[in-house]
Amino acid sequence: MNLTKMAVFTASLFCLACKNDIDTELEKKSIPESEIQKSEEKLPNEEELTPTDPDEETDKEETVTANVAYDFTGKTPPPAPQGMKWVKISQLSDEFNNGFNTTKWTKSLWNYGVPVQMKAENSGVSDGTLWIKATLGNDPERWFETSRIMSKAQVNYPMYTVSRIKGAHISAYNTFWLNNGDISNRNEIDVIENNSNPSCNCQPDFPWQMNSQYFHVVNDDTKRNKGNFDNRELSDANPLKGVAWNEEYHTFGVWWKDATHIQFYLDGEPAGSVVSARDFTRELNIIWDLWTVDADWLGGLAKKEHLSNDNINTMRIDWIHTYQLVEE
């Protein structure tokens, strides 16, 4: 459709206004520094799953379509619904080319269970990459020294976020997730909990399995379900099909569509989904961390000798892009 220069100029101003409005609202939703440490650890992953109505789940789940040209780099958001468009949220997007941006990110250092010890010095930005490193500490109980990065801004649906990540090759969860709340009351979306090197000899699919799920907890009553996907099921044209999490960077995304429907993405393709048994009601922060525990559901405890090997002990994040869905 041909547009006049005036129309193009007007549309540009409108888009800029949308972006500024989104960023202004996010500034209002940012967590004060004094509140950041109040988050508590997630509930164990061995909880029972919440059954989902199959009819409702298939209603909105996306599948790979043969005649769709996917952007395997993961940089392109999913096609917006008719009459809508994606607007990038600058406060929740970063190329990490200018160091650790303290206006966007904070090091949230509350601990998981033994043997994890969160430390600020175990994360940072170098050469355009955000990194989280696991090292061996001297504490006989909390010897797995690691870190966590959390966004200062919060966001709500409908939104899409995608991050390009290369996992540490140790028996630990390399995570990218959204959360708000504590152990007893929270809304949580886990885009990935990936372990490419399980030590338990009981999770043979983990080097390729994208562990994705949601938690919705109200007064300790938990609703939860998984939307896991195996990257060996990517389309044949995808160059990252069958490539383990530590071997190359992959892009992991989530389209949080509405109060209950959550669609995950891997390397540009839809990759599993979940439908929440309760409406999501909270604004969520974006988080990355690296952690272990002596449990088969995680893949087994990290090996201490691996934590001294800088070739495998570091999770790396190349970039993150986050978008809000708005009316055209």
Image (spheres, rainbow, N blue to C red):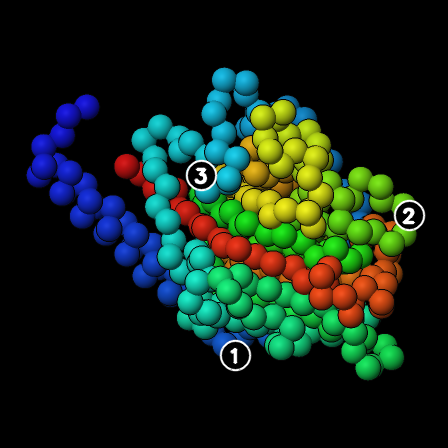
Q: Earlier in the sequence, mark 1 or mark 3?
A: 1
Q: Position of residue 220 (x, y in %)?
A: 72, 58
Q: Nearer the viewer, residue 15 or 36?
A: 15
Residue at 37% from the left image edge and 57% from the top image edge: 90
**Which residue was labeled with disc 3?**
77
Residue at 27% from the left image edge and 49% from the top image edge: 18
Residue at 34% from the left image edge and 58% from the top image edge: 23
Q: Secondary structure at mark 1?
A: helix
Q: Nearer the viewer, residue 69 or 327?
A: 69
User: Which picture quadrant has residue 292?
Assistant: bottom right
**Which residue was labeled with disc 2?**
201
Image quarter (top left, top right, bottom left or bottom right) of the C terminus: top left
Q: Earlier in the sequence, mark 1 or mark 2?
A: 1
Residue 104 relative to residue 16: left or right? right
- Residue 130, numbered circle: none
Residue 285 relative to residue 247: left or right? left
| 291 to 237, vertically: above or below | below
> Is disc 2 surrounded by few (<14), some (14 to 19) or many (20+) residues within 10 Å?
few
**Amino acid at circle 3:** Pro
**Amino acid at circle 1:** Ser
Q: Position of residue 171 (x, y in %)?
A: 80, 57
Q: Secondary structure at mark 2?
A: loop
- Looking at the image, the residue that sits furthest to the right is 201
User: Separation of disc 3 and disc 2 at Cα?
Assistant: 37 Å
Q: Earlier in the sequence, mark 3 or mark 2?
A: 3
> Is disc 1 surrounded by few (<14), some (14 to 19) or many (20+) residues within 10 Å?
few
User: Separation of disc 1 and disc 2 at Cα?
Assistant: 42 Å
**Amino acid at circle 2:** Asn
